[in-house]
Amino acid sequence: MIMSKHLLLLISLLCLWFSTFAREGMWVPVLLHQNISEMNEMGFQLSADDVYSINQASLNDAIVLFGHGCTGELISPDGLLVTNHHCGFGQIQSHSSVEHDYLSDGFWAMSREQELLNPGLSVTFLVEMREVTDAVLEGCDTIGDEALKQDKIRENIAIITNEAVAGTHYEALVKPFYEGNQYYLFINERFTDVRLVGAPPSAIGKFGGDTDNWMWPRHTGDFSLFRIYAGSDNKPADYSPDNVPYRSKKFFPINIAGINEGDFTMVFGYPGTTHQYLYSEAVKQILEQRNPNRIAIRDEKLKIMGNAMEADRATRIQYAAKYASTSNAWKKWQGESKGLVRLNAVAVKIDEEKEFAEWVNQSLERKGKYGNVLGTFEKQYADLLPYQKAKDYFDEIVMRGTDSYKVYSRLAYLLRDNEKLDTVAEMEFLSLHFKDFDTNVDQNIFVSLFAKYYNETAARFVPNALLALINNKNLEKELAKCHEKSILNNNGELSRLIKNADLEKLNKNLSGDVLFNLFGSMVKVYYDSIFPRYQEINRQIDANQKRYMAALLEKEKGKMLFPNANLTMRVTYGKVEGYRPADGVNYKYYTTLDGIIEKDNPEIYDYSVPERLKKLYRDRDFGHYANSNGNIPVCFTASNHTTGGNSGSPVINAKGHLIGINFDRCWEGTMSDIMFDPDKCRNISIDTRYMLFLIDKFAGATYLLNEMEIVE
Ligand code: ARG
Ligand code: GLU
């Protein structure tokens, strides 16, 4: 009796440990044999080679890096690709105007001829990855100086990548893992003719907008469809009318048989960045300095854009993408801070560091290698603090603050290099820029943020040009004046000079332009007084972090530690499950069309449900996409460890079929980039049944369904 009680306890403790363990981690596909038995125990029916292999078609052949920061996956033999609506948003918007408002109305090519070109967009397949640590670090042991060591590493990497793709059309790159304790080579194939095939209206694809963003329960139809085109040899080719749909090596069957709580799920894609092994003081600085500063700066900017968008429809279209991208990280930082506080993250890290120090002190050898790691961090982060603040202000206010700055940097570059004026390209840049530009909005942002910079950064980081503006005058007024008068915001004059290739006149105008010079002096202060020191301290931190990581790998030998995300292909797995966001609240793992109708409010832009969707709901015209309760499932949550870049990633069931498209994380779990909490961290996906229902019943794009493999 007593025996079995103990046994039970033991078993349940083991299960607890096991399930916690199972849910955290972003694993490297070539090393998946380390995880596969656990995945199989959780229900996964495929082998490690089915997931990633260079010898046979495997799931990785159906996955792309979409653009530079999202994931996409193939869903037909003819190169049809699905990603998120918010990943294709820039493309959808660039084809939109008040006349053709694809943002509001959606876009569906009804034949391949109608698919739309997207200059600048590319998708990248992984052909092969392999470890190259020894080759990268060759000759580095004897170099003491960190900067010189990095030079040597860069040199080695150049040799490795050149050799790897010599004589092929592939591209190669090498990335550090475990903070530079390992390196992997990636051989990629990049396609540049990628056409827009379909996107639901924003009222579906962005339903709930920035209000629901990062939140559960969620009802967003966040998907869009693209098609990869290739030359007749199926290799990448620049756009040509002769290009043909890419013939997929592998694509995902789409499963609409339904999902249940506890089902195995896996997400396979391109997570961007995580900071899993930070020193406690770094976490503290994020909580106390970085997040509050960046949130406050964006508060200002969002308020200004939001008011203007509310007041005018054309402005709403112009600023839709800018608003969404500004608000996204702003909201995430807020959730992240809350989560770190709730987890007591700084104290947890400090405890871990105490234990680490004890472990180090257990042997002379360890003391020699790692004895000063923690103390070094302490000093480095203290040094970094003022530079980190200045850099965050510069990045948020100067670099990313205004649109005028984009024109400044383009022109500054042009004048430095004035032999090569490409009038056509520059005119295209200007026309794209001014299409989505409202000078009042930009001016208000400029005035508000630059005043903030002046008031809140240390005097040594404020350039004379900004001081000169103030010189006993009203700063805001002077800032407004310089924005108003600047040629940077004068489309007519600027376009005329560029069209006539009159660089001399342009140069003359710019040299007397107060805004142009102010931007220039901000950049100069940054490169003279902020960036070099910031970079130097970070180089030292990185070197120390590498030692810390090496020590952790040694200390935790046997337990698997996953390498931080670095925008390379990763596998993460977990289960379909809901969670408890707060005391007394229990979240179910899925939402349905009922919830969309409940949230419907024609008065509020983010919650205005298209009439056509309401009619389908009233008529219960659900095709074969309903769940067993006769309702359309919309989104679901699961315990996969994802991050930015996993947007658009396939959510895969035990059989390797597509059951969802990942697009977000739950608010309560957004600290998972720094510290994961198995109880609260959930990824959010659109259910493939909702996606197919929209393509079929809402859009009537049934010809697309014919090329998919649908499993019921
Ligand atoms: N939070 C998601 C991600 O990080 C979705 C962002 C786009 N949606 C939005 N409403 N801004 O990318
Ligand atoms: N929406 C995110 C992206 O664009 C994914 C959500 C997350 O950060 O986990 O990648």
Image (cartoon, rainbow, N blue to C red):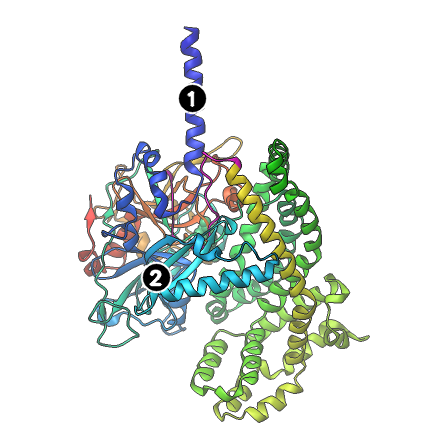
Vertical position of residue 361 compared to residue 7: above or below: below
The residue closer to the viewer here, 170 or 339, is 170
Start-end of magenta stretch: 555-574
Vertical position of residue 106 compared to residue 99: above or below: above
Q: CA distance from mark 2 to mark 1?
A: 44 Å
The residue closer to the viewer here, 382 or 369, is 369
Does the magenta run of residues contain 561?
yes
* Image position of 100 (left or right of 518): left
Residue at image mark 2:
188
Mark before the other along the chain sequence, 2 or 1: 1
Q: Main secondary structure of the magenta part?
A: loop
Residue 488 visible, this angle? yes
The residue closer to the viewer here, 236 or 432, is 236
Identify the residue shown where x is 38% and y is 55%: 609
Vertical position of residue 113 compared to residue 127: above or below: below
Q: Which mark is residue 12?
A: 1
Q: Quadrant of the N terminus?
A: top left
- Could you tell me residue 35's position as x and y percent? 36, 38
- Could you tell me residue 531's position as x and y percent? 64, 65
* Image position of 295 (left or right of 78): right
At label 1, which amino acid type do we have? Answer: Ser
- Could you tell me residue 217's position as x and y percent? 43, 43
Quarter occupied by residue 255: top left
* Image position of 650 (left or right of 321): left
- Could you tell me residue 141's position as x and y percent? 54, 54
Q: Mark 1: give few (<14), some (14-19) or many (20+) Cα within 10 Å.
A: few
Quarter occupied by residue 424: bottom left
- Numbered disc 1: secondary structure: helix
At label 2, which amino acid type do we have? Answer: Asn
Judge: label 1 CB < 8 Å from ligand 2.
no
The residue closer to the viewer here, 675 or 158, is 158
